[in-house]
Amino acid sequence: MLLIPCPWCGPRDEAEFTYGGQAHVPYPRDPAALTDEEWARYLFFRDNPKGPHAERWCHTISCRRWFNVVRDTATNEVLAAYRIGEAGPVIS
Amino acid sequence: MSAGTRPPGADLPEHPDHLWREPDPKRSYDVVIVGGGGHGLATAHYLARAHGITNVAVLERGWLAGGNMARNTTIIRSNYLWDESAAVYEFALKLWEGLEAELDYPLLFSQRGVLNLAHSLQDVRDSVRRVEANRLGGIDAEWLDADGVREVCPIVDISPAARYPVLGGTYQPRAGIAKHDHVAWALARSADAAGVDLIQGCEVTGIDVRGGRVTGVRTTRGSIAAGRVALCAAGHTSVLAAMAGFELPLQSHPLQALVSELLEPVHPTVVMSNAVHVYVSQAHKGELVMGAGIDAYTAYTQRGAFHVVERQMAAALELFPVFARAHVLRTWGGIVDVTPDASPIVGRSPVAGLYLNCGWGTGGFKATPGAGAILAHTVAHDEPHPLARPFSLDRFTTGALVDEHGAAAVAH
Ligand SMILES: Cc1cc2nc3c(=O)[nH]c(=O)nc-3n(C[C@H](O)[C@H](O)[C@H](O)COP(=O)(O)OP(=O)(O)OC[C@H]3O[C@@H](n4cnc5c(N)ncnc54)[C@H](O)[C@@H]3O)c2cc1C
Ligand SMILES: [Zn+2]
């Protein structure tokens, strides 16, 4: 089980959270202007790295807030947690 | 022979010490297959046996069939909703029905049937719809009411007071299970005997592309030139695609399973419930084999969280009160490559000569011979097999998805 550091409540068990997939995927500003390829990318393509991954979590059974985490998908190590609107860390 | 006179598993066959050679990689091959799981081995087998292509290497970063092939719960069935999927899985099921003879090896293929339970009115409607669709497509499928469920599997609690009342279920009598290790070993032996090099401990670390065409792979055991390359890397396919310079609509998730200690035969079939997230069968040796859905986040760790296991056990106990005193012997996880429509991607990639076989997600074991046959055809002819055509990568752009979430999410 992951120990996830909610930026509002501190470290809590994974079971308290809901996973929200890749972070920082903006809704297209003008969806109607997208080509089929661009629309497909927005709908269906998400990062799937073996390594650091910026992702959203919601602290469903406590503060109920969404926030961002950078987690290494090869080790499950949580490298950073930050509030929505804050810039993510630079992970090399 | 009555149960109790011989220990469970006593009738499993002995294996010879060596079923394949341990060759060093050559400098070049006509076809390089990345990944020595069930699909890679089946592809090699059919390239050699159906298309006469034997200058082939299967490159495996670990040991043969140590990935999902060793970790799956071996459910085989073809009762998917859409014609495209039913066709592909039924093609595979027909191959399974002749595979022991084809490979001359005991696979413990047991057509003990698969039951998918319905617990709500919506479940019933979806299930009956799927049964009708299957029957129209020539696939054996039946709708059973609760008493029918009990007849097939007497230990399911069908009492109206049950926490998850059983309103009925779909049943595919020709579905079943097989012994995954034997399947891998038999395919490996066949490919090896035909001249295919099975190379273990050989990780592909780069894919060479020149002028839009694949020319070879770089590996931890040196560079290998290749006329064609087929990706059979399951959960690691995104990593390999990135080496070749493109992305795929895949998410790699942990999927867990577990077994109980060995028990006398109590469970004659396979029971799944999408609604309560668990499925159960009993292996030949006697373990109860159970699994559920994926862990929510993406990962490559081959392990998942215990609360997921705990939840699936809670569900299993509601359906099978008789399991209350069984002990968990072992839990484990694999990494499955999941697509947005819960259907596989098979066919050409954006790079010429590089072929895709991925996205089988939680349910690719049942496809093993079918996927191998279709991919071998696709590689041999540089032309997608007719059954693979609906599963092209460009369906995510055209919108022609094959949405199998109802038939393939928790059910494997
Ligand atoms: C717990 C669990 C239960 C499941 N239950 C079922 C079920 O009941 N029924 C069903 O139909 N399906 C089931 N599945 C799904 C099924 O196991 C997979 O869809 C199927 O095994 C995938 O094909 P494969 O056998 O070729 O994969 P794998 O055996 O995973 O083979 C892929 C291979 O590629 C290798 N590889 C990866 N990257 C590289 C690289 N860079 N270089 C060289 N080699 C590489 C890996 O080491 C691996 O051996 C289950 C999966 C899991 C994890
Ligand atoms: Zn919180």
Image: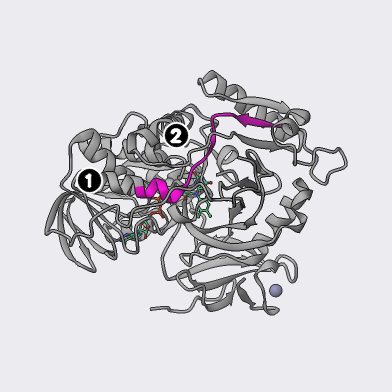
Residue B326 percent coordinates (x, y)? 71, 57
> On the image, which quarter does residue B381 sit in?
top left
Question: For the residues marked 1 and 2, what is the alpha-carbon distance in whole angstroms?
Answer: 41 Å
Q: Residue at x 68, y 78 (%)?
A: A8
Of pointers 1 and 2, the one earlier in the residue sequence: 1
Residue A31 percent coordinates (x, y)? 48, 47
Instruction: Using the image, determine if residue B136 lies above or below residue B25.
Output: above
Residue B381 in view in this figure: no
Report the amino acid beneath label 1: Ala
Discs 1, 2 touching: Cβ within 8 Å: no
| Residue identifier under label 1 | B193
Q: Residue at x 66, y 52 (%)?
A: B263
Q: Which residue is farthest right?
A: B161
Ligand 1 contact, mark 2 (Cβ < 8 Å) = no
Instruction: Using the image, determine if residue B279 lies above or below residue B60.
Output: above
The answer for which chain carries disc 2 is B
Q: Is residue B170 magenta?
A: yes
Report the amino acid beneath label 2: Ala
**B380 relative position to B396: left or right:** left
Report the span colored magenta.
Answer: B169-185
The answer for which chain carries disc 1 is B
**A49 relative position to B197: left or right:** right
Camera-side residue of B348 and B387: B387
**A32 relative position to B308: left or right:** left
Residue A24 in view in this figure: yes
User: SS class of the residue under badge 1?
Assistant: helix
| Residue identifier under label 2 | B400
